[in-house]
Image (cartoon, rainbow, N blue to C red):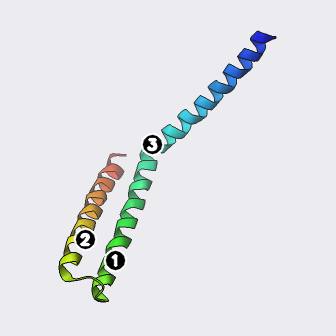
Amino acid sequence: IIWTTELAAALEKLNDLERQKEEILKFYSPASFINRLQDAMNETDKESEMVNRQLLEKEIDLGTFVQKYKKLRTSYHRRALIHLAAKISI
């Protein structure tokens, strides 16, 4: 009886670990990476549009705009290049 109980507990633990492994593998899969990269690109693009609107509405000065916009667009294009390379390699 004790052995059966221990076996059941060990099998349950094994199943949990296998489920965790599958989730981790799914998270780090190439398709998941490409999707997360696309999401990050979209978010960066929205942020740069927001900074652009702030400049047009005179909420920020030109110097601040240039700094923020350059940083955001550099990040966007870096991600876009990685995204393109990942899609080509898959």
Cα gap from disc 2 to disc 3, whole angstroms: 32 Å
Question: Is residue 82 or residue 53 the one in the foreground?
Answer: 53
Residue identified by numbered label 2: 68
User: Along the polypeptide, which appears first: circle 1 or circle 3?
Assistant: 3
User: Along the polypeptide, which appears first: circle 2 or circle 3?
Assistant: 3
User: Along the polypeptide, which appears first: circle 1 or circle 2?
Assistant: 1
Q: Disc 2 residue type? A: Lys
Where in the figure is residue 7, as x and y percent of width and height?
A: 72, 16
Q: Disc 1 residue type? A: Glu
Element type at marker 3?
Answer: loop
Where in the figure is residue 58, as x and y percent of width and height?
A: 28, 88
Q: In the picture shown, does residue 42 fall above or below 9?
A: below
Q: In the picture shown, does residue 59 fall above or below 33?
A: below
Tags 2 and 3 touching, CB below 8 Å: no
Q: Disc 3 residue type? A: Ser
Q: Quadrant of residue 63?
A: bottom left
Q: In the picture shown, does residue 63 fall above or below 79?
A: below
- Which disc number belongs to residue 29? 3
Residue identified by numbered label 1: 49
Furthest-left residue in this view? 63
